[in-house]
Every structure is written in C-alpha cells, then in structure tokens.
Image: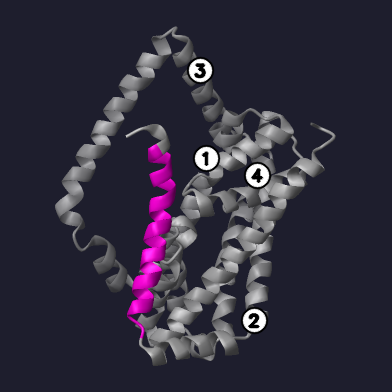
C-alpha cells in the first residue's frame, strides 16, 4: 500500500465510520422517536448553548495564552493573535484529519513566527502531558461517582490482556533504547536530521521545567478544563429533560464524550451516541439524551468550523508584513 493511499484511508475511514454510525443510529429510530428529537431541537433554549460556546472560546484563548509560558524559556515571543489562530486552526484540522491538529498548530506558528517546527511541537507535547493529567483526574472523579459501571465497562476483559500489554511495553522500551543508540552513533545525513528533530523535541518538552510562571501555567490548565466541563454542564439547561441531571451524570457524560472524540473526526456520529448512552443511565429519556448529544456536538463543531476557517483566512492577511 503506497503512502498516498494510506493517508487517504487514514482520513476517509474515520469519516466513513462516523457517517455509518449516524445512519445506523437513525435506522433504529421509529417515526415518533424522530418527531420527539425534532421537538427537542425546536424547543431547546439556545441561550444556554451560546453560553456554552462562550466558555469554549475562553478555553481556546486560555490555551493560546498558556502556550506562551512554554515558548518563553526557548526565547520565542509570538504574538497572542498568532497563538490563538494557530490553536483554532489545529482544532479545524482535527475535524478533517484525526490527530493532525498538533502538527498543523506547530507548522502554523513555525511559518508565521519563525519558530523551528520541532521546538514548537515539543512545547505542544508538553501541554498535552498536562492535559492528559487533567483528563485522568476527571476520569478518577467519574470512577469515584460511578465505580462499578465504569470498571465493568473498561476492565471487564482487561485481565486476559494484561500480559500482552506488559510484553508490548517491554518490547517498545527495548526497541527505543536500540533506536536511540543507533542514531546517536550514526553520521548519516538523514539520521542527523532525526537527531536534530529529537533534540528540538526534547528542548520543547523540557521547557515545562524552565517556566518562570509555573503557577500561571497550572492556573490556566485548570481553567481550560473547567471551561470544558462548564461547556457540557450549561447545555443540560437547554432541555427540560436534562436540567436536573446529577453531578455524576455530568462528569460521566463529559468523560465518555471526550473519549469518543478519538474514535472519529471530532466525534462524528460517535459523540452523540456515547453521551446519550451515558446519561440515559441516570434516568434521562433516550430521545432527549440523543437530542442533547447532537445539540452539544453540533454547537462545538460549528464553532470550530467558523473560528478555524476564519483563522485560515486571517492568518496570511495579519502576517502579510512578515511575509
């Protein structure tokens, strides 16, 4: 299989999976179910949805501002506007090519601020480490509130696969050691390029330990994830059936929805189904739960398309003098 075909499949398959899940979900609905979901969309209070989008915008601005704390130790000071637009572009690219947003973000800031790609990408990796810690913390809270449900869902068959996971980690570790020893001693020009890339990547990751404003970085990390949770929470007030959901349902629904984003492009077809399946466990009507999931996903996606698309258009205009 050639490289171009692999890239095409990597892009198309998640979209095809998402569309298939949408069609499958719709095929299971009866006419009265479809009418009920349409009614939920028509009667929803969209002021709460707009408030959710406002929290989403705050999270993007905070993420762009937090990024500067990672770039300062490397002596790079890009404009805040470029940081914001690079972040928004990354979200847009993730809708098209799964997990390519970080590369697009590093490429964008490298193009317009003359920051080496590998160093920019290293700082983004460092950010992701902080974000993973926050996500794991929220998952821990979800487990605290719904231990039995999530344990059976995630680890029902985990014991039979635990040995394979351990062997796999050992194998990866051994191969990594051999790989780094090989490139360290090599004088091949291509290998030297890899060395320079890895060195820049390490510099970017190490910047998290050199920050002068560590507490500001920690504050913005908490703020970003608080905004994410609030984005989900306030939309529950848009529908009468979801208004009185318990805190446990909100946290579990948020976690399940977040994890679904990794399956297809931006959670296409998956996010509404996963969120609905989570909150129905807390007594929410199935049709209302599905409507909630679709309202939440549609609002987020439209925001990314709008602001990401504008950033694509504005970036070259804003930086025309630099070009």
Asked which quadrant contains residue 296, the reply is: bottom right
Residue 272 position, x and y percent, is: 44, 72
**What span is in magenta?**
5-29
How much space separates mark 3 and mark 4, taking CA atoms? Answer: 26 Å
Quadrant of the drawing holding the N terminus: top left
Locate residue 126: give its quadrant. Answer: top right
Mark 3 crowd level (few <14, some 14–19, many ≥20, 10 Å Cα) = few
Image side of residue 217 versus residue 160, left or right: right
Color theme of the render: one colour
For this rendering, which residue is in front, 267 or 156? 267
- Which secondary structure, mark 3? helix
Q: Residue at x 50, y 56 (%)?
A: 134
Residue 90 vs residue 133, the one in the foreground: 90
Residue 194: tell me if it is visible.
yes
Classify mark 1: helix, strand or loop: helix
Secondary structure predominantly adopted by residues drawn in magenta: helix
Q: Residue reaching furthest left?
A: 160
The answer to which of marks 4 and 2 sits earlier in the sequence is 2
Q: Secondary structure at mark 2?
A: helix
Q: Which residue is mark 2?
A: 46
- The mark nearer the N terminus, 1 or 3, is 1
Q: Which residue is mark 3?
A: 193
Q: The C terminus lies in which quarter of the figure?
A: top right
Residue receiving disc 1: 125
């Amino acid at each position: 299989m050639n490289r171009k075909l692999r890239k095409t499949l990597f892009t198309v398959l998640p979209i095809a999976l998402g569309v298939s899940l949408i069609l499958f979900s719709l095929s299971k609905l009866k006419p009265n179910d479809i009418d009920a979901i349409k009614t939920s969309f028509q009667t929803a209070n969209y002021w709460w949805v707009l408030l959710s989008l406002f929290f989403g915008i705050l999270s993007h601005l905070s993420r762009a501002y937090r990024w500067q704390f990672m770039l300062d130790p490397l002596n790079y000071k890009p404009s805040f506007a470029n940081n914001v637009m690079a972040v928004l572009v990354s979200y847009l690219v993730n809708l098209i090519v799964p997990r390519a947003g970080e590369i697009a973000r590093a490429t964008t800031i490298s193009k317009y601020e003359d920051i080496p790609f590998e160093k920019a990408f290293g700082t983004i990796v460092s950010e992701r480490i902080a974000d993973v810690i926050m996500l794991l913390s929220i998952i821990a809270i979800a487990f605290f509130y719904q231990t039995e449900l999530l344990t059976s869902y995630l680890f029902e068959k985990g014991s039979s696969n635990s040995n394979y996971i351990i062997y796999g980690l050992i194998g990866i570790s051994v191969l990594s050691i051999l790989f780094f020893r090989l490139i360290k001693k090599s004088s091949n020009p291509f290998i030297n390029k890899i060395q320079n890339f890895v060195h820049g990547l390490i510099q970017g990751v190490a910047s998290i330990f050199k920050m002068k404003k560590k507490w500001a970085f920690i504050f913005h990390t908490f703020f970003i994830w608080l905004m994410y949770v609030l984005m989900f929470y306030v939309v529950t007030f848009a529908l009468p059936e979801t208004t009185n959901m318990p805190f446990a349902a909100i946290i579990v629904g948020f976690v399940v929805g977040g994890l679904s984003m990794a399956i297809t492009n931006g959670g296409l077809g998956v996010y509404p189904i996963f969120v609905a399946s989570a909150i129905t466990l807390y007594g929410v009507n199935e049709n209302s739960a599905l409507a909630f999931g679709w309202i939440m996903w549609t609002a987020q996606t439209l925001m990314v398309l709008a602001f990401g698309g504008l950033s694509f258009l504005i970036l070259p205009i804003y930086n025309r003098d630099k070009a």
